[in-house]
Image (cartoon, rainbow, N blue to C red):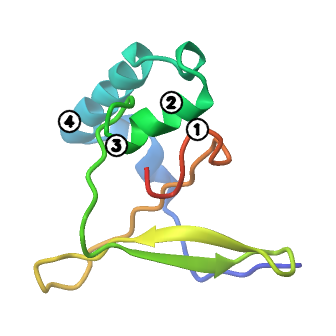
Amino acid sequence: MTLTSDITLDASKFKPENHSEESIKINAWLEDATRTAPRWENFGIIKYRERGEKGEGALPIKRLPDAKDETIPSREEGRSIPVRVYTPDNGEPSKGVFLHIHGGGYVLGSHTQ
């Protein structure tokens, strides 16, 4: 199946020299949080997931009450992909899109974590 998109990315924005100070600080915090966090191997997968749901994982979980769980179609017939949609709560239109693709196949978490 061929997919088409009207999304265009400016690759220059991903070059390190174009990162803002704020982005650099956030990235450093993320690297430290994930490097120093307890590993799932120490708890087993079920306990690790439970800890993540309680906010005891590598990264704090902030659940926004107005977030909507949706699904988007998969390339595979009969399958869909769960997504969580966050929209501004200030009545203003969104100024951008944050797309987080979970690389772990939801083995350690889910689209809500």
Which amino acid, by three-letter code, is at mark 3?
Asn
Depth check: 17 or 62 in front?
A: 62
Which amino acid, by three-letter code, is at mark 1?
Leu
Depth check: 41 or 101 in front?
A: 41
Q: Is residue 104 above or below residue 71?
A: above
Q: Which residue in the protein does label 1 denote?
A: 108
Q: How many residues crowd around disc 4 within 10 Å: few (fewer than 14), some, or many (20 or more)?
A: few
Q: Which residue in the protein does label 3 denote?
A: 18
- State the SS at label 4: helix
Specify the label residue 9 is tagged with.
none
Task: Tell me how far mark 3 sits from mark 1, CA to CA.
Answer: 32 Å
**Disc 3 or disc 4, which is closer to the eye?**
4
> In terms of sequence position, does the residue under pointer 4 or pointer 1 come before the other?
4
**Disc 3 or disc 1, which is closer to the eye?**
1
- State the SS at label 1: loop
Task: Tell me how far mark 4 sits from mark 2, CA to CA.
Answer: 33 Å
Q: How many residues crowd around disc 2 within 10 Å: few (fewer than 14), some, or many (20 or more)?
A: many
Q: Position of residue 89 (x, y in %)?
A: 16, 77
**Disc 2 or disc 1, which is closer to the eye?**
2
Task: Tell me how far mark 2 sits from mark 1, CA to CA.
Answer: 7 Å
Which amino acid, by three-letter code, is at mark 4?
Glu
> In terms of sequence position, does the residue under pointer 2 or pointer 1 come before the other?
2
Specify the label residue 21 is tagged with.
4
Residue at (29% x, 39% y) in the render: 60
- State the SS at label 2: helix
Q: Position of residue 27 (x, y in %)?
A: 34, 32
